[in-house]
Image (cartoon, rainbow, N blue to C red):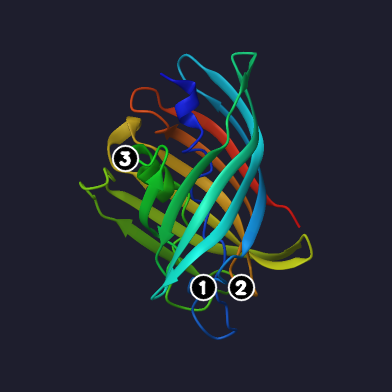
């Protein structure tokens, strides 16, 4: 396994950069052209042969708006990775992704945009529901298989579990559980995600992942966080 290939998939889709959140309307993804959000990334992952600690920054810039779809350029920079107690230098990496109005992934382009990347995107996506958010609201997402991109069937469950102000942003707190079909070897994630009440932008995410498909041959398990830089 080439460790350098891990980077493009880590932190790939923890929700859309921006969205719209009128008080009595369903959240739908919107954006301002050229808008940039910066996040701190931290991950602690293990596999059969590797223990990896990763930290760095993710910058997301809105490149294009097209009939509700939002194209983002995601740059991972200032990355520091420790593999089995050995420090490794990581080059910057860029991934372009196109998101639908409900924040699900339409397309990924760039380094590492293969089947594993699409699976990771589903595991960390909060699919926006078609009703206004409120505490105790629940919804589900039955993810179909997508042979073109390599996505497998999965089931996602969401619940709004609270409200909280983070980095001076009023946010909804959402519990997320995503599980692929396929038995004990299937990938899964359990996350808590905070999204802005004002525009549905990501404020913070904390995830516990199992069998994360960062590579074809060696799935990884552990934790990952993304935190908005005010």
| Mark 1 element type | loop
Q: Earlier in the sequence, mark 2 or mark 1?
A: 1
Q: Earlier in the sequence, mark 2 or mark 3?
A: 3
Is residue 203 visible in the rendered structure shown here?
no
How many angstroms separate mark 2 from mark 3 (CA)? 30 Å
Looking at the rendered structure, which numbered label has been put on residue 115?
3
Is residue 205 visible in the rendered structure shown here?
yes
For residue 112, side relative to residue 11 (left or right): left
Q: Nearer the viewer, residue 60 or 187?
A: 60
Q: Residue at x 29, y 35 (%)?
A: 183
Q: Residue at x 65, y 42 (%)?
A: 57
Q: Residue at x 55, y 28 (%)?
A: 45
In the displayed image of the protein, which residue is found farthest to the left? 147
Q: Are marks 2 and 1 in contact (CB under 8 Å)?
A: yes
Q: Quadrant of the N terminus?
A: top left
Q: Which residue is mark 1?
A: 30
| Mark 3 element type | helix
Q: Quadrant of the C terminus?
A: bottom right
How many angstroms separate mark 3 from mark 1 (CA)? 26 Å
Q: Position of residue 134 (x, y in %)?
A: 58, 74
| Mark 2 element type | loop
In the displayed image of the protein, which residue is found farthest to the bottom? 24
Q: How many marks?
A: 3
Q: Which residue is mark 2?
A: 199
């Amino acid at each position: 396994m080439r460790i350098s290939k891990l980077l493009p998939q880590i932190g790939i889709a923890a929700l859309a950069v921006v969205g719209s959140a009128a008080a009595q309307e369903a959240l739908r993804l919107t954006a301002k052209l050229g808008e940039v959000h910066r996040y701190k990334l931290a991950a602690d992952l293990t596999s059969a042969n590797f223990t990896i600690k990763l930290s760095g920054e993710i910058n997301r810039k809105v490149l294009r708006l097209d009939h509700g779809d939002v194209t983002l350029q995601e740059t991972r920079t200032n990355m520091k990775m420790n593999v089995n107690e050995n420090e490794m230098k990581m080059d910057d990496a860029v991934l372009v992704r196109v998101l639908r109005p409900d924040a699900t992934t339409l397309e990924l382009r760039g380094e590492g945009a293969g089947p594993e990347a699409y699976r990771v995107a589903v595991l960390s996506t909060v699919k926006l529901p078609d009703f206004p958010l409120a505490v105790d609201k629940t919804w589900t997402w039955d993810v179909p298989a997508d042979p073109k991109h390599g996505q497998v069937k999965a089931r996602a469950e969401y619940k709004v579990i609270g409200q909280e102000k983070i980095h001076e942003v009023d946010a909804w707190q959402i519990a997320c559980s995503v599980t692929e079909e396929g038995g004990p070897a299937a990938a899964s994630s359990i996350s808590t995600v905070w999204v802005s009440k004002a525009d549905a932008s990501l404020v913070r995410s904390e995830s516990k992942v199992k069998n994360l498909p960062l590579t074809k041959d060696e799935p990884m398990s552990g934790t990952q966080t993304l935190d908005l830089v005010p």
